[in-house]
Image (cartoon, rainbow, N blue to C red):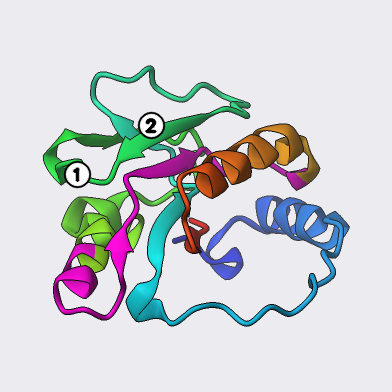
């Protein structure tokens, strides 16, 4: 991932201004979850990942792609459109952006109850996260309907 200090000063200042302008999200009420060893876990990523057969992400995309829990990493592609987005880590180890392989290992070892049947990927790089309210709410409903207990939010 690119650091602000690695960017041109003008670009770094622009991104820092956007980050400072983002609304603060207050924590929700505390809940006591069930043990991880009994929990179904899903992934929500902003890496712009999808299956090869899916439509690539477009600039300004607010939609998402559904990735099956049994997806093969060889079938996943990244079409994130940001020019500042470094894809090399994903190319070396897809678990960096989408730790599905690690979840499978954890399920096999009994550390988590199960890997969810469905996972979700958005294209990040949006200066106003409020724009994702509708699709984020929709994905939240889908996760609840699939009885997912834990979601790994993987911002990239």
> Could you tell me if residue 125 is visible in this image?
no
As drawn, is 136 to the left or to the right of 114? right
The x and y percentages for residue 120 are 44, 42
The x and y percentages for residue 87 are 33, 49
Quadrant including the N terminus: bottom left
The residue shown at (38%, 31%) is: 79
Tag 2, which secondary structure?
A: loop
- Mark positioned earlier in the residue sequence (1 or 2): 1
The residue shown at (56%, 78%) is: 33
Is 86 drawn above or below residue 72 in the view shown?
below
Tag 1, which secondary structure?
A: loop
Q: Are marks 1 and 2 in contact (CB under 8 Å)?
A: no
CA distance separating discs 1 and 2? 20 Å
**Which residue carries the number 1 mark?**
70
Decide: few, some or many residues near mark 2? Use Cα within 10 Å; few <14, some 14-19, many ≥20: some
As drawn, is 155 to the left or to the right of 8? left
> Could you tell me if residue 101 is visible in this image?
yes
Is 52 drawn above or below residue 123 in the view shown?
above
Question: Is 112 part of what is drawn in magenta?
Answer: yes
The x and y percentages for residue 30 are 74, 80
Residue 77: image quadrant is top left
Residue 87: mark: none
Residue 79: mark: 2
The x and y percentages for residue 111 are 27, 80
As drawn, is 62 to the left or to the right of 29? left
Q: Nearer the viewer, residue 44 or 115?
A: 115
Decide: few, some or many residues near mark 1? Use Cα within 10 Å; few <14, some 14-19, many ≥20: few
Q: Nearer the viewer, residue 149 or 7?
A: 149
């Amino acid at each position: 991932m690119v650091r602000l200090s690695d960017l041109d000063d003008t670009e770094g200042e622009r991104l820092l201004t956007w980050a400072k302008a983002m609304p603060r999200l207050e924590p929700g009420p505390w809940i006591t979850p069930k043990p991880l060893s009994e929990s179904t876990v899903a992934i929500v990523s902003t890496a712009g990942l999808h299956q090869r057969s899916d439509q690539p992400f477009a600039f300004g995309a607010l939609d998402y792609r559904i990735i099956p829990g049994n997806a093969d990493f060889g079938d996943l592609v990244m079409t994130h459109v940001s020019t500042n987005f470094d894809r090399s880590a994903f190319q070396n180890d897809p678990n960096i952006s989408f730790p599905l392989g690690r979840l499978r290992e954890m399920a096999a070892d009994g550390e988590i109850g199960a890997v969810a049947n469905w996972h979700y990927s958005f294209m990040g790089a949006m200066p106003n996260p409020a724009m994702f309210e509708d699709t984020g709410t929709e994905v939240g409903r889908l996760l609840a309907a699939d009885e997912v207990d834990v979601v790994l939010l993987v911002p990239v």
